Image: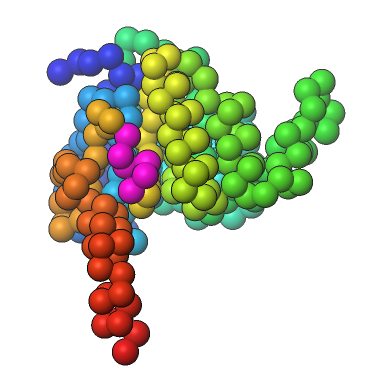
Amino acid sequence: MMNNQLLQRVYINWDKIDKYSYLREIEALKGLEYLEFQKPVTFFVGENGSGKSTMLEAIAVAAGFNPEGGTKNYSFSTYDSHSELCEAIKLVKGIRQAGWGYFLRAESFYNVATQEEEYTRYAPVPSEELHKKSHGESFLAIAQKHFKSNGLYFLDEPEAALSPQRQLTLLMEIDRCVKEESQFIIVTHSPILLGMPDAEIVTFDHGTIHHCEYEDTDSYQVMEMFINNREQILRRLLQ
């Protein structure tokens, strides 16, 4: 069913993936035929190694973004680590075309910041000088500059560099863009970001990709349990 999202569906053609590929060993991914996006914000959640960042990266690359991040204008490679999944993905887009976009990933942000300085060295626009800012300040500078209306954005663990207060600021930036018809697909462990109203949460845990409620995410449950039973939990863990 068509909706108003910029990215409607993602199909996977497993015939294009090598029969010995490690992708076929990821429980949540193997056999997956498609994913559908019905909300302007979709969160991918799950334990480390569950395949959520692999899926996000593949969709972003299939959408035309550099595997290490940046806008579609970024074309560089410091380390070729992305999977072949992007070659097997077909995107189904909506009737609207994205006017802008950005792929923000925590693990390669240093490389993107370095490349940004290189790109602006001979350009009429000044550099953001991201290396002169703290990691968290750089992340928010990117959000405030590149998050625009009618944009398609992929964020991989954006909370990695952000304090709880700055995570709230990022949530506000996302909400601002959503109200201006942008779409976000986000991998996160943050119970703060996951609390965004009317977002779709997709978990990669328990062997299959499926939807879940905010209160059912591990991020929420573990944080709630720790806050409410901190002394007992620490005593049990550290004895």
Q: Which residues are drawn in magenta?
A: 191-196
Residue 54 visible in this rendered orientation of the protein = no
Residue 82 visible in this rendered orientation of the protein = yes
Left or right: where does residue 133 sit relative to residue 144? right
- Which residue shows up at 45% across the image and 38% down it? 168
Residue 7 position, x and y percent, is: 33, 24
When asked about the image quadrant of residue 228, the answer is bottom left
Quadrant (top left, top right, bottom left, bottom right) of the C terminus = bottom left
Vertical relation: 41 (above or below) 13:
above
Compare residues 50 and 218 and report the one nearer the observer.
218
Residue 185 position, x and y percent, is: 36, 35
- Name of the residue lying farthest toward the right: 122
The coloring applied to the image is rainbow
Left or right: where does residue 128 sit relative to residue 195? right
- Which residue shows up at 15% across the image and 18% down it? 1
- Which residue shows up at 60% across the image and 34% down it? 142
When asked about the image quadrant of residue 171, the answer is top left
Is residue 194 covered in magenta? yes
Residue 186 position, x and y percent, is: 38, 39
Residue 216 position, x and y percent, is: 17, 50
Compare residues 164 and 57 and report the one nearer the observer.
164
- Name of the residue lying farthest toward the bottom: 239
Left or right: where does residue 77 sit relative to residue 4? right
- Which residue shows up at 22% across the image and 30% down it? 36
State the count of labels.
0
Compare residues 161 and 150 and report the one nearer the observer.
161
Is residue 69 covered in magenta? no
